[in-house]
């Protein structure tokens, strides 16, 4: 579209060429840099906010300024019929020379110069959003032409104007403007008419600029659109529980209050404002507007990323909230954050804050922490499994059911406090559910002698064990490990066992024969059959030839749906058990002998959660019951 510059501004100069780098970059800025065209409004409002902040500092030292009584505010007006959008501020304004310098040179930013000057005076700069230089040019994604009209705060400066179409040149001239500040007038392209609709503008302002420090008014009815007050930037001591809860509901659209609120402000090693929430449930509710995991990331109260997943480790993905950091390494479009040591440091700070909050909750608010653990414990276990650098800080957060205290949650420290004298290991057992695992034959020795065992029946427990093999110099040991060195029981129990022991009615030869009978019957379904002295009340158990580690990895493969076959295990028999004693006396040709051997083996498979089809056992069990009734 051809536009006559002289129709747009007064006393226009001859066309002025943008600097060489501007010509090269302008096309990229307009067509390639930004992923969402709506960003242009965020940039223009941010520039307006910076102009107001600069004016606020000017008025601290200068008395002679234009419009000293005017309110600091931003106005957004539209003409829907003409597709015209205007953004006006009452900020510092620009002289004609400043218009030419600031808008004709890429990366020339009044905000940058102001920041550098103000930093020397140690001023509070939290409301300065700029320092980027190219944001203004994003307007050409949606504009046929742009006109800037500005009046400086300096009483002797004349109003100035600037006009461009996004081509290689721009023009400056004089203007008529009574009030201090700047107006950016945008003639929208036909395919950008949506940005001349009040409802669309309101949506964009609420999304990106809701917490700009100055009021933003939309339309002739002077409707203030933005909230202004960013609760996360308040002193935590000045915010009450009701305000936190209200903001959480605004953020998530959830009805229930959060389980916990984490609000902190840090000045070093970087300036951070964060307001994080542990939700009441791990799953997002049906009404939530948060479509993904991730925190809202702001830079000086302007939204940069709606779902930032780089601020916390994956295992803390259930955390919701906002983070506002200054001096972030943003890319040139301010639509994303560049990977850097700064981001890694920010992630570390936030992660530590969450972990410390949970640690304090576990110590000081046990009931609340138990509620947290029952809902979010699997995430902590995931962290133990996956986070090599930070997993030790998560160990005190772990909670378990145990054989001695099956109805309460116990920490590893609780377990250590209840250890028997001389015990130097933490014992655990893996299973598919708490009820069945307590009947495992692997527990025989430990229950007989009063040793407490952690019950690991959560599917993620096998993964967790990959990240914790020792706690406070106590090694964690699986009671199903065939090579486990058993703890020495108290003397009185050992004496009782010796009194109760009686010589087996089966001779060594008969025991060897029975073991071979098991091997012949089960064939290559087992790696070996051997006697054990680790069983007391149980008949048999299965152990892994590769040790406990092999058993745990097999469970991991099953959970990951990897190709899985029933591994060949070692069947260990309690040759002192009455069932084995009587089985050894049956003749080899007895028709029940083979069935009993099969049932013993498949019962151990069932206990281990390895049986491929438990229903197959029913005919055999029926046969054994019929035989028992005959006697």
Image (cartoon, helix red, strand yellow):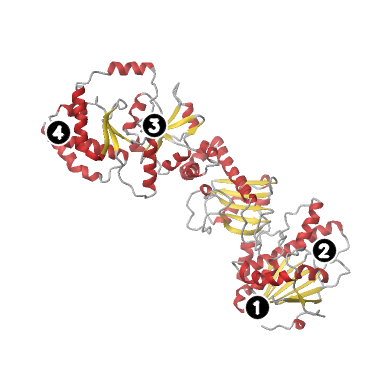
Q: Position of residue 595 (x, y in %)?
A: 17, 37
Crowd around label 3: few <14 · some 14–19 · many ≥20 (10 Å): many
Quarter of the image with the C terminus in it:
top left
* Residue contact between numbered discs 4 and 2, judged by CB atoms under 8 Å: no
Marks 1/2: CA–CA distance: 33 Å
Secondary element type, mark 3: loop
Q: Is residue 212 left or right of residue 394?
A: right
Mark positioned earlier in the residue sequence (4 or 2): 2
**Which residue is nearer to you in this view: 312 or 63?**
312
* Residue contact between numbered discs 1 and 2, judged by CB atoms under 8 Å: no
Q: Is residue 462 left or right of residue 274?
A: left
Q: Which residue is mark 2?
A: 69
Q: Taking the image as drawn, is residue 598 in sight?
A: no
Marks 4/2: CA–CA distance: 103 Å
Mark positioned earlier in the residue sequence (2 or 3): 2
Crowd around label 1: few <14 · some 14–19 · many ≥20 (10 Å): some
Q: Which residue is mark 1?
A: 83
Q: Is residue 218 left or right of residue 541?
A: right
Q: Which residue is mark 3?
A: 403
Crowd around label 4: few <14 · some 14–19 · many ≥20 (10 Å): few
Q: Which residue is mark 4?
A: 628
Marks 3/4: CA–CA distance: 34 Å
Secondary element type, mark 4: helix
């Amino acid at each position: 579209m051809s536009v006559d510059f002289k129709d747009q501004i007064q006393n226009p100069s001859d066309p002025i060429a943008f600097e060489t780098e501007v010509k090269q970059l302008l096309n990229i800025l307009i067509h390639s840099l930004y992923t969402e065209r709506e960003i242009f409004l965020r940039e223009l409002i941010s520039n307006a906010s910076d102009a107001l902040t600069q004016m606020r500092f000017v008025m601290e030292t200068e008395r002679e300024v234009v419009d000293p009584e005017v309110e600091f505010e931003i106005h957004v007006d539209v003409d829907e019929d003409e597709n015209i959008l205007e953004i006006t501020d009452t900020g510092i304004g620009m002289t004609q020379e400043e218009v030419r310098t600031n808008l004709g040179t890429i990366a020339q930013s009044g905000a940058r110069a102001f920041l550098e000057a103000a930093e020397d005076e140690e001023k509070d700069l939290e409301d300065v959003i700029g320092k980027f230089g190219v944001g203004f040019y994003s307007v050409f994604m949606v504009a046929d032409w742009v006109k800037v009209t500005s009046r400086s705060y300096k009483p002797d400066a004349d109003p100035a104007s600037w006009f461009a179409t996004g081509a290689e040149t721009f023009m400056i001239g004089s203007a008529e403007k009574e009030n201090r500040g700047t107006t950016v007038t945008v003639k929208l392209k036909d395919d950008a008419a949506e940005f001349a609709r009040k409802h669309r503008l309101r949506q964009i302002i609420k999304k990106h600029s809701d917490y700009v420090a100055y009021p933003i008014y939309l339309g002739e009815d002077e409707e203030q659109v933005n909230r202004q007050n960013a609760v996360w930037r308040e002193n935590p001591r000045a915010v009450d529980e009701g305000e936190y809860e209200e903001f959480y509901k605004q953020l998530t659209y959830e009805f229930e209050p959060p389980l916990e609120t984490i609000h902190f402000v840090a000045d070093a090693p970087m300036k951070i404002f964060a307001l994080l929430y542990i939700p009441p449930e791990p799953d997002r509710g049906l009404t939530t507007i948060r479509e993904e995991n991730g925190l809202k990331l702001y830079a000086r109260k302007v939204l940069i990323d709606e779902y930032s997943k780089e601020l916390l480790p994956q295992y803390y993905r259930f955390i919701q909230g906002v983070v506002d950091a200054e001096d972030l390494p943003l890319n040139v479009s301010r639509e994303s954050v560049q990977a850097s040591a700064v981001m890694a440091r920010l992630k570390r700070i936030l992660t530590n804050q969450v972990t410390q909050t949970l640690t304090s909750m576990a110590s000081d608010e046990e009931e609340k922490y138990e509620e947290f653990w029952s809902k979010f414990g699997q995430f902590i276990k995931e962290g133990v499994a996956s986070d090599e650098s930070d997993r030790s800080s998560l160990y005190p957060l772990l909670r378990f059911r145990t054989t001695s205290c099956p109805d309460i949650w116990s920490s590893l420290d609780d377990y250590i406090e209840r250890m028997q004298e001389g015990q130097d290991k933490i014992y655990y057992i893996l299973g598919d559910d708490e009820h069945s695992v307590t009947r495992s034959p692997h527990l025989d020795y430990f229950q007989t002698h009063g040793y407490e065992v952690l019950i690991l029946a959560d599917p993620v427990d096998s993964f967790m064990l990959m990240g914790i093999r020792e706690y406070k110099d106590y090694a964690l040991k699986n009671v199903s490990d065939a090579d486990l060195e058993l703890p020495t029981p108290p003397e009185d129990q050992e004496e009782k066992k010796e009194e109760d022991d009686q010589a087996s009615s089966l001779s060594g030869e008969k025991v060897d024969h029975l073991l071979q009978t098991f091997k012949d019957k089960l064939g290559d379904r087992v790696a070996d059959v051997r006697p054990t002295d680790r069983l007391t009340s149980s008949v048999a158990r299965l152990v892994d030839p590769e040790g406990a580690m092999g058993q745990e990895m097999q469970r991991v493969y099953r959970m990951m749906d990897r190709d899985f076959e029933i591994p060949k295990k070692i069947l260990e028999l309690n040759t002192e058990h009455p069932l084995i004693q009587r089985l050894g006396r049956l003749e080899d040709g007895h028709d029940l002998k083979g069935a009993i051997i099969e049932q013993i083996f498949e019962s151990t498979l069932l206990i281990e959660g390895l049986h491929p089809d438990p229903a197959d056992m029913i005919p055999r069990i029926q046969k054994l019951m019929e035989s028992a009734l005959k006697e």
